[in-house]
Amino acid sequence: MNFKIDTKEKFTVITPETDCLDANIAGELWKTATMRLAEPPHNVIVNLRHVKKADTDAVNDLTGLQKHFYDNNASFVICEVTKEIMPQFENEDLPDVLNITPTESEAWDIVQMDEIERELMNGME
């Protein structure tokens, strides 16, 4: 497996243990992440701290993955995007589309806020 997986109470952190995010790794990431939707915790944080290069298609796949999670009432947050690949994210305008945080701790906060928002919205229905 090319990922370190750390499960917490409200989310799972998936960290690719490779320096390259290519189509194969993106496919494995999609599979590994979406398996989390089957049982709690459903929320996923992807920590990209080791990734130094990435294929454009693989980076764009993250948008579809986030949409899939939000369509299933779960959070998907990306954190610690390295300076080497951040320009690719910016060229594709992904910081405006994806939940990206500088640190894993801030990603935890996003998940917590999403959880509170979902609880409030469910209480209003």
Image (cartoon, rainbow, N blue to C red):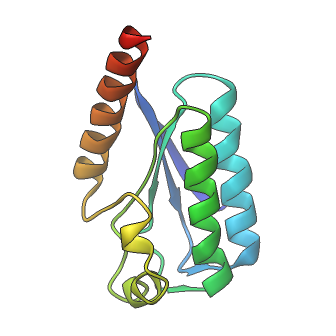
> On the image, which quarter does residue 69 sit in?
top right
Residue 55 appears in the picture as rendered: no
> On the image, which quarter does residue 63 sit in?
bottom right
Residue 21 appears in the picture as rendered: yes
Horizontal side of residue 115 vs 20, given as left or right: left
Q: Closer to the camera, 61 or 85?
A: 61
Horizontal side of residue 17 vs 55, given as left or right: left
Compared with 117, 79 (above or below) is below
Residue at 73 percent across and 59 percent down: it is 28
Q: Quadrant of the N terminus?
A: bottom right
> On the image, which quarter does residue 38 sit in?
top right
- The total of numbered circles placed on residues is 0
Compared with 47, 75 (above or below) is above
Compared with 39, 124 (above or below) is above
Q: Closer to the camera, 91 or 7?
A: 91
Residue 29 pos. (x, y %): 66, 58
Residue at 43 percent across and 80 percent down: it is 93
Residue 5 pos. (x, y %): 53, 45
Residue 30 pos. (x, y %): 69, 55
Horizontal side of residue 4 vs 84, given as left or right: right
Residue 98 pos. (x, y %): 43, 62
Residue at 68 percent across and 43 percent down: it is 34
Q: Quadrant of the C terminus?
A: top left
Residue farthest to the front, as pictured? 125
Residue at 39 percent across and 90 percent down: it is 87
